[in-house]
Image: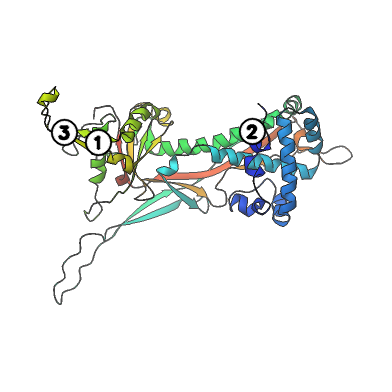
Amino acid sequence: MTRNVLDVLPDVATWSAREASTDTIYAGEGRSLSAAARRRRQQESAAYQRQLMEAARLYAQVINGSRRAALDFQEAMTTSDFQLLFGDILDRQILANYASQPIVWDQVARRGRVRDFRTVKRFTLDGGEAILDEVKQQSEYPAASLTDGKYEYAVTKKGRRIPLSWETLINDDLDAFADIPRRLGNAARRSEERFWTSLFASSAGPNGTFFSSGNKNLILAALSAGLTNNPTLSVAALQQAFQVLGSQVDADGAPIYVEGTVLVVPPALEVAARNILNATEILTATGSGGASSDAGRGDQLRVANWMANRTKLVVDPWLPIIDTTSGNTAWYLFADPDVGRPAMELGFLIGHESPELFQKTPNAVRVGGGPIDPTDGDFETDSVEWKLRHVYGGTLMDPKSGVASKGTGAP
């Protein structure tokens, strides 16, 4: 199928000259392949934009199979200006692929920003929100105590190298380049999603330290009347999860208000979850008395599906991969991090909050001097190498903002 420049480079082809400046494109995050290219874009954004579009069109023609464009492309690669343009094209394609991948973790975890690789601390305060005491005439106002909490984590580097042989580039007419941005962009986004899942799930099921009877955030009959042990996902089970979440109290013994929730399920439970949340009505028959026929049932109530307006659904495909014990049956209910206490946080290094692409500088020189084509590779093996760097980290936070069920029906 033929692709044009809008398909190959959608985020470049639609930018105006003003929007093509480095500060606007990257919003202060990430950095380009070359500091010189970065300064040049800042100084001559309009001229750079025109050159970048010309390079993008040529690149699209090469991917579409034009032999003439491939020859022009290889010839242009010997000039330093075009090397910078082409590097920027790949860099922006990776960011575009990274941005286009579905992201679900930010619906459950809070996004944080950290300044360096040292351990960061997140402090919380609990208390001071109890019902006010009566103050009698000429009496001292009672003092309230505050309880502080602390959570720690550090961001780490993640990355990958993709080496290509000089022969591959020659034989494939640069088609090998076309797949690099997609693969690296996908890898960056998938790494975030897997890391997020590994915070609250383990190979043995829900994280045993975070979800425990001591934290009162597991659906267990021993915790409260009316609960069953790790129920399978159903309307009744979800009602039990709301009961557990709603029974949490703060340091003063006051209720914790949760205005929105997120239901996280594996792909195996997607149909069941959507059926529950997309139902228009819920039929309750608490007066049935166990009768097997309608004639013997008590009064029934038809109520609007209030859970649909209060709960968002997240289908996490990493759950059965990480949780090899109950990954297809376990499900979770979290407080929405935007309207309640966050159950977890993912943090990114300030100035490097998006994946960054680098190319290895050739370590060879031509006899007699002259510029070296980056696609000629290194001196020893002719290898051409690209590197992707991504920096992030995270931690679990408030266990009162999450509920889990293994979905096994047993303790």
The amino acid type found where label 1 is placed reads Ile
In this view, the mark in front (1 or 3): 3
Q: CA distance from mark 1 to mark 3?
A: 26 Å
Residue occupying the point 40% across, 36% down: 314
Q: Position of residue 85 (x, y in %)?
A: 73, 43
In the picture of the structure, the residue carrying the numbered disc 3 is 300
Q: Secondary structure at mark 2?
A: helix
In the rendered image, which residue does mark 2 sit on?
A: 180
Q: Helix, strand, or loop for circle 3? A: loop
Q: CA distance from mark 2 to mark 3?
A: 59 Å
Q: Which residue is mark 1?
A: 219
Left/right placement of residue 48 relative to residue 113 reads right
Residue 42 vs residue 10, the one in the foreground: 10
**Residue drawn at (59%, 40%), measured in percent from left and top?**
96
Quick one: label 2 or label 3, which is nearer the N terminus?
Answer: 2
Q: In the rendered structure, find residue 276 and report the number of the disc placed on it.
A: none
Q: Residue at x 75, y 42 (%)?
A: 54
57 or 161: which is nearer to us? 57
Dot 2 amino acid type? Ile
Q: Residue at x 29, y 46 (%)?
A: 400
From the image, which quarter does the C terminus lie in?
Answer: top left
Examine the image and state in which quarter residue 312 appears.
Answer: top left
- Residue nearest the viewer, comparing 263 with 221: 263
Residue sitting nearer the eye, 312 or 247: 312
Q: Where is residue 68? Give x, y as percent.
A: 80, 30
Side of 288 where 180 appears, left or right: right
